[in-house]
Amino acid sequence: MSPLRLSARRLRRQRGISLVELMIGITIGLVLLTALASLYLANSLSRTEFTKSAEQVENGRYALEQIRREVELAGFFGVGNIARSTKAADPALCATDAAALGFSPAAETVPVALTGYAPGVAAPCLPDLAPTSEVLVIRRVSTTAVAAPAPGVPYLQVSACSQDTQTFVFDASGAAAFGLRTKACDPAQPAELRRAMVRIFYLAGCDRCSNGGDGIPTLKMAELVNGAFQSRSVAQGVQDMHVLYGVDQDSNGSADCYVSDPRANNSAVCTAVPGYDWGVVLNNLANVTTVRVHLLARTLKPSGGHSDNRTYDLGRAAAAGPFNDGYKRHVYAQVARLVNVAGLREQ
């Protein structure tokens, strides 16, 4: 074969793709990239929605669990519970002074273990309280005893010695005020000291409320610390809360009727125990042995294309909603028992 023919043959073998072939290849590549991008976007949206729902479930359940744990501890007034032999007192919602917390050795009173307030209650200690929020107050002492009292902090000391002239001491002035003894009646073995605790659950319209707030509805808890209430967030996204109070009308430890306001006369709706007197508010509050808590939790961010047109049963006469917005919601409910109140009655 001549050199010219060989050169022409080599050129034909080294020939590249045509413009048409190039455009077809680019088009196929773009189609594949578009499909992959669509798949990635769909997966991202699904993952985002799953995260939103998971946060909502976690926040709702966590909020219920925190309330349940506190309700079960309500009315704990130390070893050898003094609530059996004392009368009830109903301190003011935002009381901070030791003398106003409901403990009185002279009058033999201790505060009611649990109480609640309807929306609109005046609460200067809860500056971020939502206008539509109910308030749940739990009173007890710490489950951990201290070796020595801190000045200015109220403590409860309960006597186990038959020779002591007082059943209990409640004071915030320091170690000199506490002289009660254990069962051994040995002055070298003083009875336990436990710090007084007040915890208030309520709803706020924001998690971080400075500079106008972030607009995230949040369940918060205010705690009495060093003579003042300090608030912290419990769970974001909790939009509504309703509490039903189970009143034990026959003193057997079990709730006979659930009411929204134990301070009111509920004789028309609570007829299981004839003759119960609803006229004494303190008795009604002291007879609460269980609570049924309903929480309405929503996602923290709206979902595109979603419109919430459902209604939600929170135990009220009227259902909540529809809200007609992009947030997804769910109701969480649980019955919690006041063990330190109901248990004594069962015994």
Image: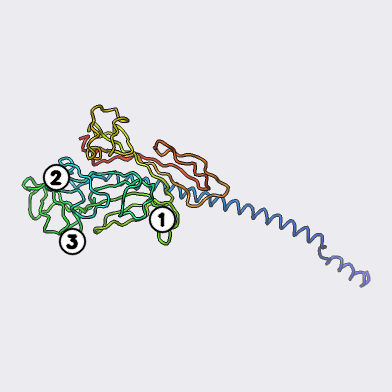
Rendering coords of residue 192 (x, y %): 16, 52
| Nearest to viewer (mark 3 / mark 1) | 1
Do the residues under discs 2 and 1 have CB atoms within 8 angstroms?
no
Label 3 crowd bin: few (<14), some (14–19), many (20+), radius 10 Å: few
Q: Residue at x 40, y 51 (%)?
A: 218
The residue under label 1 is 207
Left or right: 52 in relation to 162: right
Identify residue for label 2.
108
Q: Toward the viewer: 242 or 187?
A: 242
Residue 228 quadrant: bottom left
- Residue 36 percent across, percent down from the top left: 65, 54
**What is the spatial separation of the Cα atoms under label 2 and label 1, in whole angstroms?**
40 Å
> Could you say which disc has been placed on residue 151 in the image?
3
Q: Are marks 3 and 1 in contact (CB under 8 Å)?
A: no
Label 3 or label 2, whichever lies nearer to me, is 2
Residue located farthest toward the left when viewing the structure as drawn: 163
Residue in the picture at 7% in, 45% down: 162
Instruction: Give the mark nearer the N terminus: 2 vs 1.
Output: 2
The reply to whether discs 3 and 2 touch (Cβ–Cβ < 8 Å) is no
How far separated are the C-alphas under marks 3 and 1?
33 Å
Secondary-structure class at tag 1 = loop
